[in-house]
Amino acid sequence: MEITNILINHLTEPLGFELKDLRIEFTLTANHFTACQKKLVITTADTEVYNSGYLTYDNNYFTPSLNLKPRTRYDVTVFVKTNQEEIKHQTYFETGKMTEAYSGKWLGNRDKDLQNTVFKKEFTLNKAVTSARLYATGLGLYEAYLDEQKIGNEYLAPGSTDYTNWVQVQTYDLTASLQTSGKHQLLFSLADGWYKGNMGFDGGKTNIYGDQQRMLAELHLTFADGSQQVINSDESWGTTSGQVTKSSIYYGEDLDATRQLTAWQPAVILDYPTDILCDRLSLPLTISEYLPVKEIITTPAGETVLDFGQNQAGWLEFYNREPKGTTITFEMGEILQNGNFYRENLRAARAAFKFTSDGNEGWVRPHFTYFGYRYVRVSGINHPLNQADFKAAVIYSQMEQTGALTTDNPKVNRLFQNVLWGQKSNFFDVPTDCPQRDERLGWTGDATVFSNTAALNMNVFEFFKKYARDMAVEQKNHDGMLTMYAPALGVDDGGAAVWGDAATIIPWNMYQIYGDPALLRQNYPAMKAWLDWVDRQTTTPNLWTGCFQFGDWIALDGENPALPTGKTDEDFIASVYYYYSTTIVSKAAAILGNEAEANSYATKAANIKQAILAEYITKNGRLAIDTQTGYALALYFELVPKEQISRVLTDLVSRLGKDNDHLKTGFVGTPFICQVLSKYGAHKLATKIFMNEDFPSWLYAVNMGATTVWERWNSVLEDGSMNPDGMNSLNHYSIGAIMEWGYRYLLGFAKQTPGFKEVTFAPNFDYHLKQVSGYYTSSYGKLAAAYQIESDSNHTIKLQLDIPFGQTVHVKLPRADKFGVTVNKQHYDNGNFDLSCGHYEISYIPSQDYIERYDTNTPVASIMADELLVAKISEVDGVLNFFKDPNNLANLGKMSLTKLNTILPFINIEPDKLAKINQILATTPILSEREAFK
């Protein structure tokens, strides 16, 4: 047994983070479960400040009540004791300024219009330093340097917030860098960023949160003799203009290395409040990896273009070899058109990096912007390019990957990789819609529908805790209404269902995945405020009507092609989410110990549900809205009584049949369509839809060469051209929410108690994907599963499960009642049993195999593509001769023989012959299955 990891508020050794609702989780590894006890001890300066004493191990976390002090390191030790041994593991955390007053002053330059304000402070050390902490922030964005070396490994600090309400302070440990006596220099370089730069639609706005770059810093030093010193930002600092001549998020950056930092003048103390300064919530934006150039392309237009092979977010770094005065321009794009560089889908975003060389060789990068791109057009270099001189720095909020899915289908694997890359590209301090064009905003609707997938893919609790603060700030500014995106960047529009319901859904989803109520506690007032706002706006009691709605955004079933809101009744969608949010608030109140409000909201939710049933669903279970999204919502949110579920499912299947078993859903319905099909017994149809490769489908984009998820199903048309309807981001994660279905129903992590202490493992098997594997790493450890169906001539299903210590898995295997199940050579009578920590080899012969066969609904086109099947049927009847004419096959090939025999007078198959044909269909494996088992 070993303790392998300790997390403090879901972070590893956090420094300067806001640490309210302290939660300490630990991971145990062992070969099998052993009864044990746990203990937490916290010390500071060798003084014990908390000791839980030994407690029975029934979960893997502690929630110590502790009055933390500012700027203090706390050492954490977790002990675990069994009858045989006692083990321990140590870590630490350190608080930031907390509520301590700031002695540093806001500094600025007399020229408010500087694009790159630089501040400098020189100081001398005469004594040995034992501790050095820099507490700093800057607006819009800043980088700090000590003795010409960048401090820390994060970029674009302090992140994106509503800077009029809260500004985050970063903490840096400079102890190791200040071990030499003598002169030292602190330097801060600032640019506009989200604070002052141009942001938003239709040309955007500038100076949204302020009109002057400014910074504040405190360097706290402790010396070996016990004395202390604080170096504050004050009038002793100097300031000038830096080498960045223009920079903003959309624009990119112009950097002139020939500019000298001269004309220093005293910094100006600015009269800005310090009570909005707070310890950080944002995860640092860091370079997670570098991508090499895959190919240097000379386009038909004669352009030189770098192809990095992967759409992603970050910036280009290059090795400068150019003589002084040479200007090089790098322009970013997502796709080529007719082999040439293309950037029109970036709209007004210039998205370029221009560098003027000082003649010195070395690596060069931008500082205060970022790009979404795969391709880079290079101009200004007049010699052949060397691939090794360029690399793509991939930047996103520092989140560890916690999940993955792999199958035996390379296209599906690419899709899941695309979803993960879309998340990496857009989890950029806030969950942006896209990383490339003149938008890059924290759209609430996108974050809502993707939040579960996000939490399974990566550790996003603290990421969403910060974003939830962004949302709560906007709600406070808008009387409870949640804006379309957060931070709102000066835009007051919002209040739509799904988008606004991020106020309740995101905190709830994070609780369900992580089991930590801290985010619920942080945002509970805002969750209630959202419902209060809806109450005041609706025109119908217990329904949500009469307000602007996005509807089922970009759905394909809209009756008016000019409107992207889809066919599903907007008031129905709004009312469903009104009900769901009310249910969430009721449950959150109960978790937080407020039973009175829990009961009140539960009653309110019941009234809303009854109103929805009365307005939209008949007593016999017929939904008044015949759309895929309508049925999906009714099933997912359990609006219909249990006895009517089969009726609604049948109607959904029928609706899909009318739509050729292809999606017509938009933002709202897409995350749920496959989930409800699989949940209620139509997993075969769910997988069929998932595996479609023509438009509209998830694999369409994969076939078109996508390396991320697109905004539209067909942002790129079949001929390779861009969709003329616009809104063609090629890095837009929302419809990647299908990956939650992959985790839940394909892999089989069907449901869990909050925090994953207990997991139901219930995989759904289908012939399309015969081998599936994946994992999810919770605070308990890595839960991994893998299976293969049809592994031999007996149709044996083989599975492997690896379960971490402290977790219980409830196994539910389909078709396992006839022959029983073997688990690590032990026999179980059926497929329902519980497993705890360990590795398990599982196998069984299903009561019915998973070989796919034709059936009575098989289209004639599929029959005609199988020579063996054509020969078998032709021995019974000559009806297929009619379809050897390509025109006949094209016109009628989508229908089955049974249907054609019913509706067409010139096709007459005698009943006994039709019965034989249908028997042939039912007993003949489809062509791809026969080829797979050769």
Image: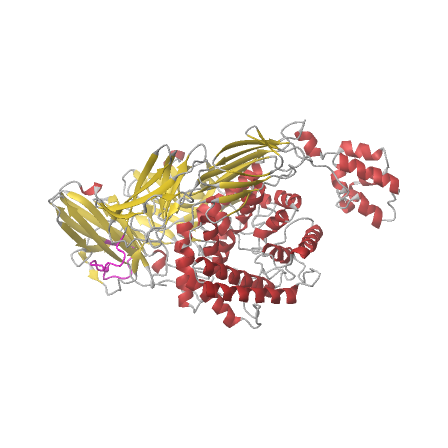
**Quick check: can you spot residue 481?**
no
Choose top left, top right, bottom left or bottom right for residue 700: top right
Magenta span: chief secondary structure: loop
Q: Is residue 294 magenta?
A: no
In this rendering, the answer to whether 782 lies above or below 583 is above
Instruction: Locate residue 264, reporting x and y percent.
Output: 18, 54
The residue lying furthest to the front in this view is: 83
Q: Magenta residues?
A: 96-118
Q: Is residue 387 left or right of residue 452?
A: left
Q: Is residue 109 magenta?
A: yes
Choose top left, top right, bottom left or bottom right for residue 929: top right
User: Residue drawn at (22%, 59%), measured in percent from left and top?
Assistant: 102
Instruction: Locate residue 80, reporting x and y percent.
Output: 36, 39
Q: Nearer the viewer, residue 717 or 826?
A: 826
**Quick check: can you spot residue 576?**
yes
In this rendering, the answer to whether 171 lies above or below 816 is below
Q: Quadrant of the N terminus?
A: top left
In this rendering, the answer to whether 577 lies above or below 6 is below
Instruction: Locate residue 396, reporting x and y percent.
Output: 40, 46
Number of numbered discs on residues: 0
Q: Quadrant of the C terminus?
A: top right
Q: Nearer the viewer, residue 429 or 332?
A: 429
